[in-house]
Image: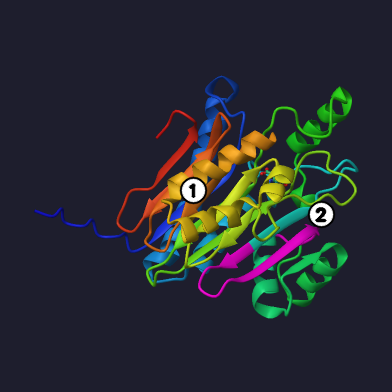
């Protein structure tokens, strides 16, 4: 007798809000509550669209916008500071249907960098814009502009000052990555991915991480899967994490979890840390991280949203 196949969910949405040394002992109950509530709001925003038959691209943009507005995460408002004391934002979005992609790096005035990435994808002949030019394009496209002070929070300023006073190295030694991202599979069977970040505290010289680099921090291909990453960007770029996961799924036929775990182990072997979220065209999903925790959440059509923070939560 054959086992009846489990019906694939009509749609799937998975989100992350960064990975790192996130442990119960280091979290206040308030911060725990606030971040879970924000993850739930992001899942609700994306689900509302997917429930109405909306596209995976619409859903990942909507989910990421919610987290960009929340000062608890390192994206949009609450982004980390550069060495010079400014906020420079990176974001990317990709549609698995046609592998259209858009990305921006070092932008300073767009309230929702993920929406600017989407404009690059849909309303420009390009894939990747950076710095002043990207800011100009954003204003020309009439996206919501804010004063750069909108992004700055006292806590992120304090983190920069702490990093400078310790003078221990290039990066945040606590390895707290607060990048946000979403992957979705819609009811038409298409996947999409989006990622948005302020990068790494104390970044200099126009440093760009993996988040906006198509194939590193963000990738989507209906023939394989959609991936959004968070972590030590330099290692994710060198590994080509998001594309590498999709390649294993596409050519080796690996299940999402195996592909994600294998690639994250390779990142670790290089010396990198962080995590990924993945969904495939059948609505299957996976997350994988080599840090103590990762802010994360998932919801499927008709299901109950689930959010988690620590490594020991399922
Ligand atoms: N991956 C991001 C970067 O390297 C940082 C993060 O995930 O928080 O810019």
Q: Is residue 135 above or below residue 153?
A: below
Most extreme residue toward the top is: 25
Q: Is mark 2 within 8 Å of ligand 1?
A: no
Q: How many marks overall?
A: 2
Q: Is residue 194 left or right of residue 139?
A: left
Residue 18, percent from left and from top: 60, 42
The secondary structure type at the circle numbered 2 is: helix
Indicate the quadrant where residue 109 lies: bottom right
Cα gap from disc 1 to disc 2, whole angstroms: 39 Å
Q: Is residue 240 left or right of residue 305?
A: right
User: Which residues fall within the magenta stretch?
Assistant: 93-111
Residue at the image position 54 percent from the left and 38 percent from the top: 289
Residue 44 magenta-highlighted: no
Q: Nearer the viewer, residue 59 or 258?
A: 258
Residue 174, percent from left and from top: 70, 27
Residue 112, percent from left and from top: 67, 60
- The residue where tag 2 is placed is 148
Residue at the image position 42 percent from the left and 66 percent from the top: 186
Q: Residues within 10 Å of mark 2 (few under 14, many from 20)?
A: some
Ligand 1 positioned in quadrant: top right
Q: Earlier in the sequence, mark 1 or mark 2?
A: 2
- The residue where tag 1 is placed is 259
Q: Nearer the viewer, residue 120 or 241?
A: 241
């Amino acid at each position: 007798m054959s086992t009846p196949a489990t019906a694939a969910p009509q749609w799937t949405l998975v989100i992350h809000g960064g990975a790192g040394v996130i442990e119960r002992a280091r979290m206040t109950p308030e911060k725990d509550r606030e971040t879970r509530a924000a993850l739930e709001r992001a899942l609700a925003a994306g689900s509302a669209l997917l429930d109405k038959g909306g596209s995976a691209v619409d859903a990942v943009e909507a989910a990421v916008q919610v987290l960009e507005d929340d000062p608890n995460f390192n994206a949009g408002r609450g982004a980390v500071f550069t060495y010079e004391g400014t906020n420079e934002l990176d974001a990317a979005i990709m549609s698995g249907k046609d592998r259209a992609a858009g990305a921006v790096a070092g932008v300073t005035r767009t309230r929702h960098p993920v929406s600017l990435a989407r404009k690059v994808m849909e309303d420009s002949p390009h894939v990747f814009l950076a710095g002043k030019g990207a800011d100009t394009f954003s204003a020309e496209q009439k996206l919501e502009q804010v004063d750069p002070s909108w992004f700055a929070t006292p806590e992120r300023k304090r983190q920069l000052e702490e990093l400078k006073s310790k003078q221990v190295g290039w990066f945040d030694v606590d390895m707290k990555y607060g990048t946000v991202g979403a992957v979705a599979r819609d009811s038409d069977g298409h996947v999409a991915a989006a990622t948005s970040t302020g990068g790494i505290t104390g970044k200099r010289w126009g440093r760009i991480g993996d988040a906006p680099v198509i194939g590193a921090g963000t990738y989507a291909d209906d023939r394989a899967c959609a991936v959004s990453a968070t972590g030590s960007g330099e290692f994710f770029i060198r590994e080509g994490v998001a594309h590498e996961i999709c390649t294993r799924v596409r050519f080796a036929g690996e299940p999402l979890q195996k592909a994600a775990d294998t690639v994250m182990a390779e990142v670790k072997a290089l010396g990198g840390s962080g995590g990924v979220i993945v969904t495939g065209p059948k609505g299957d999903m996976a997350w994988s991280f080599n840090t103590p925790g990762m802010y994360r959440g998932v919801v499927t059509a008709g299901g109950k949203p689930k959010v988690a923070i620590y490594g020991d939560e399922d």
